[in-house]
Image: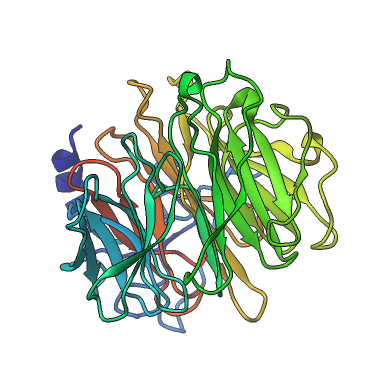
Amino acid sequence: MNRRQFIKLSAATVGTSIALAGCTADNGAEDVKASETNTGEKPAEDEPEEEKPEPEGGDGEPYTHYDLDVRDEREMGQPVWIDSDGRMYGRDGPHVTVSDDWWETTDVLYTFEDGHDRNVQTVIVPDSGRIIAAVGGKGETGGTVELLDRDLSGHETLYQFDYGYVSNSLGHVVHDDIVVISCYQLSKYDEGRHGNEVILSIDGGETFELILKPPVNVTNAANNHIHDVEYDPYAERIWVAMGDHGNSQLFWSDDLGQTWDVIDDRGQISMVTQVAAFEDCVVLGTDGYPEGILRWERESPTDKPENVDSFVRPHVQIQKKADEEKMEMYARRRWHIREDDGRELCLIPFGFSPMNENASESVVLASVDGDEWYELHRTDTREILLTNVMGPLSMDGDRRTLISDSNQGEGYQIDATVPKFWE
């Protein structure tokens, strides 16, 4: 099925706008209760409450009885960030693009015209409002981190990596004035070149400094590069996940990168590509089989994992189809809300690996506690590679989200509502 066929088929369901509770397309249930439509209408109070069937999942599998309430599906460029005001930012060659209507229309905000390899890789906008663009880095020259002038009259280079680029689907996180960014690239062992730098800003993206550059452990692994970074506000801790295989490691720092602890000997931990810190646990999104979630439960935020066995693997495993040998997908850029009242919501897309010519699926998992996970969406076409989630901005209100393929072709977006699966 090609992308346009998929969109045509999907369009037949657009407009129903029903958040499903108690069934999925493949569980055989016929009794579906429309809990709320996108018009805000709710069932009349005098209607009898229908008994919901037992949810499928649990015991190491995601629950599958909730689906995204899809508003629209479309192809329109590559959005990569949403700020706290709901403004979306994207990339288009040397252009930073912007949208104020959830990516229905876009405008060019800024263009990098000077120099070679000025393609925008991603855009990051912390609460300070500073617009940071990661530019270039897919050639021989390391990419740069650029700060746009407030009046958009120019830009300032804040940092240049030795080698590699900032991925739009891995390796950057923002919390208040803390911004952590890493670079990514396939290693060139014979030249000593690796995408293995982590940089930090503590002033909302005004300045950056290098805080970690792990050396090579083995050369018979595919790469020595950074997969993901996380700022854990409960422990005031920075986490860094590194691959591949014999070079894999999980680092953490409780002093903003001045010193580092590690989970175990290099290469002992399985490869992971996402780190998400919940109040009571830390979870890792996997890089390959078994696809899903590793989890370490902590009693206190300042606890430290003892070794790789501290992480249950797999805590939750995404289920493949009966006729599949394996899915070959890995975790992409998450969206994590931490409300002032202590509630949390984390969405993690898992997209197929383009290096496997038979892989085709993308899945979106969601959790409010890092323990129970819900599969909210799944695609099974190679034309769509879900790479990041933008929104919702709150666990209340319309809970609108945009799930994007920001890597391939013209880009693909799912504009949807996250169902309230936590109630």
User: Given the current orientation, which residue lies at the most extreme bottom position?
Assistant: 45
Q: Nearer the viewer, residue 210 or 281?
A: 210
Q: Is residue 336 visible?
A: no
Q: Is residue 23 positioned above or below 248 on the image?
A: below
Residue 234 picture quarter: bottom right
Residue 99 position within the rendered picture, expressed as x and y whole percent measured from the top left: 23, 71
Horizontally, residue 176 falls left or right of residue 262, namely left
Look at the image and tell me in which quarter the C terminus lies.
Answer: bottom right
Residue under the image location 14 percent in, 46 percent down:
8
Q: Is residue 191 visible?
A: yes
Residue 283 position within the rendered picture, expressed as x and y whole percent measured from the top left: 66, 49
Horizontally, residue 171 falls left or right of residue 269, namely left
Q: Nearer the viewer, residue 131 or 153?
A: 153
Horizontally, residue 181 falls left or right of residue 156, namely right
Residue 244 picture quarter: top right
Residue under the image location 54 percent in, 45 percent down:
197
Residue 30 position within the rendered picture, expressed as x and y whole percent measured from the top left: 40, 50
Residue under the image location 25 percent in, 41 percent down:
408
Look at the image and tell me in which quarter the N terminus lies.
Answer: top left
Q: Is residue 178 positioned above or below 165 on the image?
A: below
Horizontally, residue 262 falls left or right of residue 120, namely right
Residue 258 position within the rendered picture, expressed as x and y whole percent measured from the top left: 72, 56
